[in-house]
Each structure stands twice: as C-alpha cells, then as structure tokens.
Image: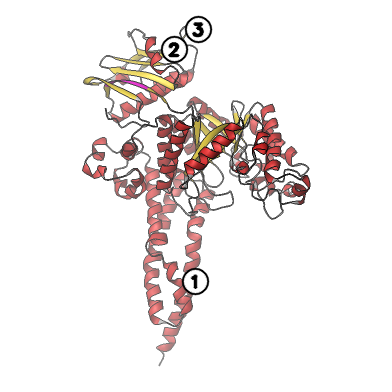
Amino acid sequence: MSFQLIPTPQVVQSRGPEQVRGIRGWAVQLRSPGEDVRLVVAAERIFAGVTAHAAQGGSGVFALVTEGTPLNPLLARRVEGKHDGYVLITDKDRIELYALSAPGLFYGLKTLEQLLGSGGGTVPAVTIADWAELKLRSDYLDLRTVYPTYEHLLEYIAELADYKINTLIIEYEDKLPFRELAFLRHPELAFTEEEHRRLLQVAHDHFVTVIPKQQSFGHLEYILKHPAYIGLREVPETVSELCPHRDGSFEMMAGILEEVAALHPHSRYLHLGCDEVWTLGTCADCKRSGLTPEASFIRFVNQLAEKTLSLGKQPMIWHDMIMQATAEEIAALDKRVIVVVWIYGGHRMKADARQILHKLRDAGIQTLGASSVRCWDDNGDQNYPVIHNRIKNVQDWIQLARTEQLEGIIHTNWGCPFSLGSPYGLFETSRYPAVFAAEQSWNAGAETATFLTRFLHQFHGLPADRLSGEEWADYAVTDYYALIPQLLPEVKKNRLTAELIDAMIQYELPAQRRSPLHTFLFRGAMSPGSEEVMTFLRDKYRSGYGDLQRAKLRMQSVLAELLVPQMAELFIRSRFYRPELFEANLQAMITDLEIIEQKAGEP
C-alpha cells in the first residue's frame, strides 16, 4: 500500500477498501502500566474523549482502544524486542493501538495523526506494525551563529516527534544561562533560566532526549577570548584551542562541565566535543610532557571523562583526534567514553569508517556514527545544504549502521565552520535532509524515490494528487531546492521555509550563477580608459546590482520573521559584504569614466 507518511512504516496491511471516518469524534480508553501525562495529551489532540487508566504491574502493555473494544494485548508481541514499536489497527468501527513502551504508543499516535492529516480526517482501514531501525535517532542544533527565534525553536523541537526523532544534541556555546560562570553568557542572546527550562520541558513532552554539547578542548573561542583564560591557549595566536598540560586548564573545564550538567539534570549523556584541536602538541608545555599529541589528548579526555562520570553523565567525544593514535594509546582511553565517528563524505567514506569503528571496538570502546545533513562541503557560502552530498552521506551511514550493528546515528547539522566564521545558511533550509535522515533512521528500507513527494505533502502541504503523474517520475530526491521557486504559490505549510529557499535562490542568480559582475571587474582595473570595457561594466552593473538589491530586500523581509534583528544583520552582511565591496570599486571606475567623457565633450 502507498501512503504519504514520513517515516514509512515497516509493515502495512490492508483491512479492506472502506475509509474510516469520524475518528476525531470518538472516545477512547488509554491504558498504561503507569501514569504518563504525555500520552494523554497526545491522545487528546486526536480524540474527542480520552479516559486514562494507570494499572500497576500487569502485562506491561500500553494500549489505546475505542470505547467498548475489548483489549487484545497479545498484538503487542508483534513488536517485541523492537525499538519504540507499536501496532495500530484502524477499522470502520474502532481504533486499536498497542505498544510495549510509552514512546511506542506515542509514535503510534503520531502515525495516526499523519494519516488523518493526509486524508482530511479519514484514514484507510489498515494494520500497521512499526518500529525503529535505530535505538538512538538524533538531530542536531547548532547555536553558534544564527538560529531560529525562541518560539520557532520550541516549534522545531516539538516537530521532531512527528518524524520520530528521539534525541537532540544542542551545541549551546555561550547561549546557556551559566550561573557561577555568568560571564560566559552571551550578553544578549543567551537563554534565561526559565527559557532553558521550558525548552527542556518541550523536549521531554515530545519524548526527545536533549544531550548537551560542551566543547572541552578545541572550538573554545567563546571561552578562551576572556582575559582570565587567554593564558590557557595552546598557542596565543589560536583563540580556540586549550593546552591540556597548562595549570588551570582542567580546573576551568571541570567548572564549566559542572554547570552544564546541573542545567541538564535528566540528560544521561554529555557530549564533550574534543574535535579539531589542530595545534595540540606544539607549545612548550606539551613538548616538555614527552607525550605524543594523541597520548596528550587521551590523557586529558580521561580526566574530563572522570569528571563527567562523577556528575552522573556518560561522556561522548568525536573521533578525529585519535585517528592516528597507536593501539597502545587507544587502549588507554577510558572505556566508559562513547566515541562518535564522523565522516561526512569522500569516495572511501564507508571503508574509512569501518576501519575506525573496528579499531575502536577492538579496544573495547563504545561507538556511534555521525552523518551530516549540512556541513562544509567545500562551500562556505552555501545557502542551503549541498544536497546530493548530504543524501548520499546519510544513506552511507544508515548502511553502516546495519552492517556494523550501530545503536544510533547522530545526524549533525552545522550552522557554520566555527563560531567566528560565516554562517552556512539558515537552519530552516536544512529541514529537508534532516527529515530524510529521520526517516532512514527509523526505516532504512523506506523508498528513497518517493521521499521528495512525501516531504512536499507532509511538510509543505501540497495535495497528494498534485504530486503524482509522469512528471514526478522524472524528479530525483535531490531536486527539492530547485523545485521550490516553481512550487512556492502552492505551499500551504512551513511557507516561511519555502520563501527563504526562494529568496536564497533569487540572491544566488546574480551573485553566483549568472556570470556575477565581480568576475569581470579586473578588466576595468586593467583598462581604465577603455570605453567599451566601461560601457560593458556599466551595463552589467545596472542588471546585476539591480537584481542583487531586489534580492536583498526580499531576504531581509523573510529574515525579519525568522531571526532576531542582530542575527538578521549578521546573515545579511555575510552575503552582501563582498559584492558591495566590488560595487564600491566599480562605482569608482564608472565615475572616472563619466569625468573623462565630460572633458572629452568640452568645446
């Protein structure tokens, strides 16, 4: 059977041709081994009446059935041993939903919600048996440069549950409401304590576990810029990297980890980062230690890990700084540390990942994988993800998760190369590959060829019948961004996201794609007295910069609804600063030509 659902369920069986109607007016019984208000709230979003019964002990089965329908908890065995599984039955006179966990029942309700939304209130008569491929299915929120307004953030976190994402790693940087170390807070953009509590509550309400990401070795620009910590840099001219042998380095990070852990009392994990410490081993203190950079790295990570464990959290780190470590050095790494292997592309991606995973496992170290739905991709000016690279990277990691029996994948989503760098693009433009990654994490067998139309239906509200026919057979999953400008008039949901993508494309046409004017500017510098060169540049100026100005106004209009003013200004400057420098040079050239022309025309 063909549905427009995301993720695609594992098993769908028809119960007949009749549509099930009137579901939202039905009353249901919700039975669970213990009280969980989240399930009641989710059920009340769908049904007119919900009666909840919490039974201690018993079968351990979570069930939701229409009033008067006898329970059949045996059906839950279809998903026994599966992650977050559920069994959903829709028929002309009843709904039955069974699970062996609260998240399972919750995700069954989410599937029913999608069915109702797609069918305009009616659903097919079906039996669905569904479960997750991966235990940990993680999205990523990078708060280093530009990111959604607070209310949009809360909407996004709630939306994760629609696509059955159960984990969110947040790289807060200076946006946490630090207490003892309040000087680390961003003076304008940090969350208040109440805002942060509400954010965590929204995640909890939607069965999303937040894992705080606290950089602890490299990428520490926002910490090592402070006068009290400048002396802890590996080398003075590199603001982002910590010397592990310097007195005070561990004590500084221990104090920060205490604050981060206290702000996330219910998080099981704490991600310590520890990637890209490029200058490690170059300062005098490191050289005096007699250790290799890898051995120094592992020694310091073990100290951080011990501290993290004492705070009741299990530590995670990225893998890259131990890639060249010897077997003896890796054997010294604390076995309670989870190493997350991130490889975002390259023709040897899977081979390299397997080699690293095997090396770590042979040393008795727990591993996870990490794809990226947006990263550098040799393009720091990207306005939306380089989609063909990102789709392939997600697919490669999902295949590795199967063959290497990984428990989970973190689908990273980087907002910039580093905190002082230029932003890649706005967060909203990455929802397409992020939802693709969510589906693959839930059901690796989901049909890739239909994802584009299912996303346009679920995320943007295009009618299902609009997305069928021969023309859609010719589109690939990577065509999403190119299609948005022509589909924009029909977009009904998440319209700001579509308008943002369209605005980015309208900017790219004169700035990057259509022989941008700055590529000809050298001719004016070489031939300042050439009438034909200057006339050519003047003509290109009128068309190119006229289109750029219109694109800027359009972009500003969209950003005003998505970003706080400070972030909107930063993003606009990141896109228009360079072409406006070129424009200033060009105007000087054109002015010179006009003076020459005036003199030439004098009697």
The spot of residue 587 in percent (x, y) is 46, 72
The stretch of residues the image draws in magenta is 125-129
* Front residue (pair 183, 140): 140
Is residue 270 depicted above or below 393 in this figure?
above
At mark 1, the secondary structure is: helix
Residue at 27 percent of width and 30 percent of height: 2
Quarter holding the C terminus is: bottom left
- Residue identified by numbered label 2: 61
Looking at the figure, which quarter contains the N terminus? top left
Q: Residues within 10 Å of mark 2 (few under 14, many from 20)?
A: many
Observer-nearest of 129 and 576: 129
In the rendered structure, which disc, 3 or 1, sits on the residue that comes first in sequence? 3
- Are the two marked residues, 3 and 1, in contact with CB atoms closer than 8 angstroms? no
In this figure, which residue is indicated by the disc labeled 3? 57
Q: Is residue 392 magenta?
A: no
Left or right, 75 with respect to 568, comes to left
**Residue under circle 1?**
585
